[in-house]
Image: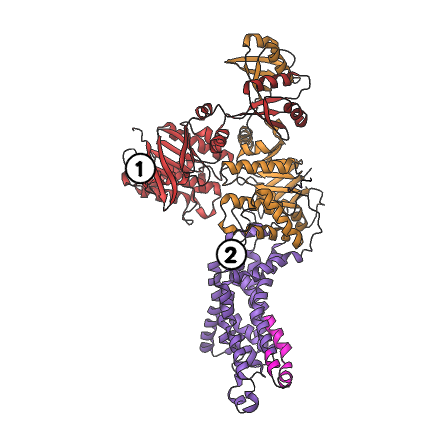
Chain colours: A red, B purple, C orange
Amino acid sequence: MSDVQLVFDAVSKWYGQVSALTDVTLRCGPGVTGLVGRNGAGKSTLIKLAAGLLRPSTGTVLLGDAPPTRRAARALLGYCPDVDRFYEEMSGRAFVAWMLRLDGLSARAARERAGEVLDQLGLGAAMHRRIAGYSKGMRQRVKLAQALGKRPRVLLLDEPLTGLDPVARHQVTDVVRQVGREGACVLVSSHVLHELENLADAGIALVHQGRLLAHGGVAELRAQLSERPHRLRLRTTRPRALAARLVELDSVARVAIGARDVEVETRAVAGAFADLTRLGASGERLIDELLPLDDDLEAVFGYLVS
Amino acid sequence: MAIFERGYRDLAYRPTAPFRRIWPIARHELAAIFRIRFGTVIFIVCLAPTIGSLIFLLASAGIWETEPRMRERMAGFDPSLPSFFLRPITSALGFLPFLVLTTLVSARAIAKDRAAGALEIYWTRAITPLGYFVGKVLGSFLLLATVFVVAPFVLWLTSVLIAPDWGQFEATIGFLPGMLLGLTVHAAAMAALAVGVSALASTPNMASIAWLFVVVGTGFVGQVLRRMLAEPWVALISPWSAAARVVDWFAGWTPVVSYPPAAAGVALAAALAAVLGLAARRLRVLEAVAT
Amino acid sequence: MSIELSGVTIAYGTQVAVADASFVLPRGAVGLLGRNGAGKTSILRALLGLVRPAAGTMRILDLPQDADPREVRRRVGYMPERDCWIPGLNGFETVALAGQLSGLPERQAFRRAHEVLWLVGLEEQRYRAVAGYSTGMRQKVKLATALVHDPDLLFLDEPTNGLDPGGRVEMLDLIGRMANELGKSVVLSSHILQDVERTCGHVVLMERGKVLASGAVGELTRHARRAFDLVVEGCPAERLVPALTADGVLAVTDRGSGRLALEVGESFSPAVVFGAVQACGGVVRRLVEQRRSLEDVFLGAVRAGAEVG
């Protein structure tokens, strides 16, 4: 099956005078792309445009070669929204099967597929019980199952891991990564950045105040921000003593004291490392660990958004 | 120059007594009617029957002395009889404001909190679910008491103050304390009943519907059964009818269509016991903290 | 010691939710981890006095064992996971009411509500109705109601739920401050293990009613044989490796481009590494102990617990 791409071409969306998205051009290929941004930045608008729930005010959105508002395109689309609304009286399996029938599967095929995907997500015997009695994590799995059930070529996931315990998070992350590896275009929106970094092998798209600020791999993005100050974390058993010594150094711009560590913001990176090596080698046993902080998504996000 | 820290400070205080802590709940519930849309208007409309009687009182001041025959013809409007003060409360005219107030406020009291998840906040503070329930009943009672106890008292006070002599006072002081006590019991019983019903429902709308059944539905069924079985006291399955009869008895007045007051008392107590018993079972402490 | 459980069993009718749980939680920030249905909520309910254990003893702070549950709840702050609020009130009124319900006299409750709302960052919106708040703001109100009566022990259930990345960082920093600067004991229950790793020094892991693991994060995440990840610049590995195999460093593996993996023994001190690199004329760019992630610890313990039964 050829890969389907999700394409935004100069898309803007506004409601009256309020602009939710401005001039967004984005192309998502196979693999998992992460979508990050503050609340109100335009992420949900972007996802709803991709799902065909909204029409762009200008520009075009394409799933493959047709806009998602066409039924043909929507057949390729799996959408797991943020909201939590079910028919509470149905069992988990019945609900997913019902959703799959709406997508065109026969009754029997829908039932089988529903059972299969719920098993894969770890719901087990509970799938035959009423949704009204489900915990938050179980409800989340039902939502994911209805999105994954039809083997979509484009998968939109809005906060897919909320309410899931660590074991379930692991399971779901594996399933989503697998879907991405099989060539589907997966767009995942999440606030938990370190998990997203793990999950999104095809890069991150950062939305801020309605605009697309950045798109690419985390390391790439970080490298482009090389002129920003560097932050380091020093683990120590004596934070105050260490901080006192650090303040004396020229290369150190700011110091923040924690319970078991000290966070350092440097002006001159090279000089800072040299100074810290010297400090660590001194007989006072002040530094137990040295860790650069800026290489993760949280830091990149912080810089781009501030 | 001194710079003052505006941060977190440790707190030293003498904790209030456990009973004192539920007063804010009662106060919050008392003000609930004014927070809903047109709530103030509705509240004033509920006072309309009493206001009507007040206007009548003021308009007819002095008529009773000059036209003694009117006393016989308009017995219900004679301010020296208990029926004058009870009419805006326990008659059919008083039923409507009562229904509106309780359905909008008291019968939704706990159901509203349950729907917003507030029980988890209330029951994890330093009070018990029983304290919470008592606070809600107290608040509803105070609200109902303004319409059903304070308003009639004000009416009575007016009637005494505008009378040309102490005749009105002498005529009415005999039954007044009893009447006020009866009205208080009535307001308290109805408040407890309504809040009890609100504790049973999961949403405010279901609670209002359940309450309508408890008050209007039973009244209707009671009347039908009364005609069918030709036994007047069957109508007492309606707590409203039972409570009205209890008030009348406290005021020392026997209406035309009446039931034995003891039976009314028992019926009312039974309704309360049933609803409060069910409420106690429904208000499981475990629903406070979610799974 | 903030909480001590000894042989606690909690059952609802015939269903046993917690079986013979014993642990001691030190002061500071502690993580309470476990899957849904592991028994965390039951422990929480028992500690709040909402449910009585069928067996065992519990001690909270310095309170006697048979303390009035209301008194326990007065000394403890709870931040619920669910999205909940008291209808009809604004932020300030909610927090003030919560304070009064926990025993604060009215004036103190008002003053305190303002203070706490400032602390959590809601001072601008405190007069708006809570029903109209965003998720992040509601989380902050919940935290404020947990803090208003100055409890010595706080239970925070999924405090970063629904918060955007900036909000999450704020909340975690606030929790860290409460545990470290304000001297409160904080029990944090969260499924996001990186958050727990970041803020808590001690964790308790439960599964199906039993305590699977309890200990300091540093120790639980330590490998059996300690290992460090080292990145150097300006000093070729050939010169560095011999200098490093000094006391404490057992083995060095060269990963290329300045990365080295060190296996160390009991007597290791990081100063040795710094000294060796400095003597060699280079700088240390990274020296981090390789730890198991808390996620690995969790998954491993759950799997082991499942096998044992």
Residue A251, can we see it? yes
Q: Is A36 or B183 nearer to us in this picture?
A: A36
Residue C250: x and y in percent read 61, 13
Asked where in the image residue A214 lies, by quadrant, the reply is: top left
Location of the C terminus of chain C by quadrant is: top right
Label 1's element?
strand
Q: Which label belongs to residue A59?
A: 1
Q: In the rendered image of this protein, does residue C54 appear above or below residue B241?
A: above
Residue A217: x and y in percent read 43, 26
Q: In the rendered image of this protein, does residue B67 appear above or below residue A178?
A: below
Q: Residue at x 45, y 42 (%)?
A: A139
Q: Residue at x 66, y 21 (%)?
A: A286
The residue identified by callout 2 is: B112
Helix, strand or loop: magenta stretch = helix
The mark lying in front, picked from 2 and 1, is: 1
Q: Which residues are magenta?
A: B158-185
**Distance (Cα) linking label 2 and label 1:** 45 Å
Q: Amino acid at mark 1?
A: Gly
Label 2's element?
helix
Residue C166: x and y in percent read 51, 36
Q: In the rendered image of this protein, does residue C51 appear above or below residue A282?
A: below
Residue C229, can we see it? no
Q: Is B197 or A80 nearer to us in this picture?
A: A80
How many residues crowd mark 2 within 10 Å: few (<14), some (14–19), many (20+)?
many
